[in-house]
Image (cartoon, rainbow, N blue to C red):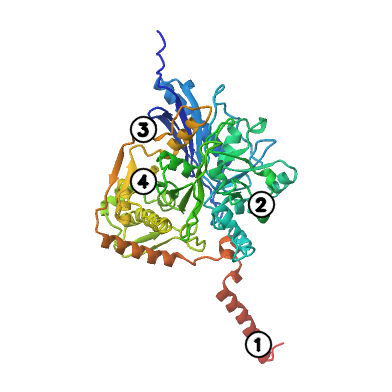
Amino acid sequence: MAAAKKAVLGPLVGAVDQGTSSTRFLVFNSKTAELLSHHQVEIKQEFPREGWVEQDPKEILHSVYECIEKTCEKLGQLNIDISNIKAIGVSNQRETTVVWDKLTGEPLYNAVAAPVSPGPSDPVAVVPSGSSVPAAGAASVWLDLRTQSTVESLSKRIPGNNNFVKSKTGLPLSTYFSAVKLRWLLDNVRKVQKAVEEDRALFGTVDSWLIWSLTGGASGGVHCTDVTNASRTMLFNIHSLEWDKELCEFFEIPMKILPNVRSSSEIYGLMCLGDQSAALVGQMCFQDGQAKNTYGTGCFLLCNTGRKCVFSEHGLLTTVAYKLGRDKPVYYALEGSVAIAGAVIRWLRDNLGIIKTSEEIENLAKEVGTSYGCYFVPAFSGLYAPYWEPSARGIICGLTQFTNKCHIAFAALEAVCFQTREILDAMNRDCGIPLSHLQVDGGMTNNKILMQLQADILYIPVVKPSMPETTALGAAMAAGAAEGVGVWSLEPEDLSAVTMERFEPQINAEESEIRYSTWKKAVMKSMGWVTTQSSESGDPSIFCSLPLGFFIVSSMVMLIGARYLSGMP
């Protein structure tokens, strides 16, 4: 029997989308932007201590290999010729930091899998996004809080009238970004210190780790990143688009371990772009003032500010949006980052057990249609934009005997929407022109209750593309458009029209404002819960508690005094 003829669909482009909770590989038709096939693998997060969040770089890499292999198998079952994949883009979680041995290919000291080959003469486009710090062979992700004392120590060295860190990077000094995580690693992990001393260490965000591994690893892997990921390290000058010597000296980071920085769309065997920047491209936000919000583990709202570097006065970040070619101009964005969005659903599933799957939360919320006055502030890792308050911790307030798991589920969804409202308000004040609608993407946008709540709380329409995988689509677009690949045009007239679903506000403005103002009260109550010592050292000493320590010391004094007054020997 003759073999079935392979379908010819024109040039295809793949995209690795490596996030905090899962890894996916997706394949698109470059002419129509149609998603042809994909595969997803969930990855673990480890919590060895309170405030510490880690992932295994080897597991991340294995998940990429598995997703590519399974997606190619599915394409074969659809009779689609995988040799027609002309480029691969990689989008990844951003500030998560990885340090590995360039001679052995091992992250710190763990073994690493054999590199995968994309096929003869096919360019590999790698679009990364962010990282954190690994301890003892694991990568600590962007949510990690272990570096708070490092941040406080460094902040004392910045003159009050000359915050050169923020002016050069667009970022506040925070546990969120890679430089302080790398500094902590160099201070606390001897294996990393020794590797740096012996010139064996390489540092990178997850994009760098994946690119290096996918292009040969210890046998000639390319050590690089792109401008969007570099801009999240706090070591990169967003004006000169180079690693900054003054910043590296301030954080005491040896420049020899840093990756080479490239544009977001060029071939050097691969190419790079950060995940939220990829989503901005995937949403086709190429004009000044266009914005998108991605709902993933966290929530990330980016507004394109064009070729102008706008600095926020309301708690937002200034970041590189994209640079789509070696000789193309750089575009900037204002960004608001929410630490906990989809992660709160995972917490309800894994920690409280009130749902068995993430999808169940929509049904629970739908049962009651209200939080019944219950407010949930999921500040598990402190509060990010616009507060930047590391002392905050999660609270659930407004509970009554009537409150049940359905109300808590509803409050969790509302929390994602309220946090987005805070970011949008700050962005509107910085830009001066309020957004008339919000473009959204990410896995959580499949939840219709969440999308309607978001429209109600923002009191503007929420617009969702019918194909929500815009982060992967943006990575694929940038990969396919790279010079030397040229299978995807980014010219406005050539971009495919996207079907949109629109959610209009269904409550009155007064009710929206009342709910939002009550949320703000809850946020204020979440602040000031922890100190640096209690959150980092975990010291069980009774003298960590001042009242208890005072009681014990005063009791000892009274006992000694009583013995003296009674004439006891």
Q: Is residue 353 left or right of residue 173?
A: left
The residue beneath circle 4 is: 439
Which marked residue is nearer to the observer: mark 3 or mark 4?
Answer: 3
Q: How many marks?
A: 4
Residue sitting at x 48%, y 31%: 481
Tell me the number on the disc at residue 561: 1
The amino acid on which the numbered mark 2 sits, given as a three-letter code, is Cys
Give residue 516's position: percent from left, percent from top.
34, 62
Residue 357 visible in the shown view? no
When the figure is inspected, residue 423 is found, relative to residue 492, above or below; the finding is below
Image quarter where the C terminus lies is: bottom right
Give residue 298's position: percent from left, percent from top.
45, 50
Q: Is residue 333 left or right of residue 236?
A: left
Q: Secondary structure at mark 4?
A: strand
Query: Residue 433: which quarter of the image?
Result: bottom left
* Mark 4 to mark 1 CA distance (whole Å): 72 Å
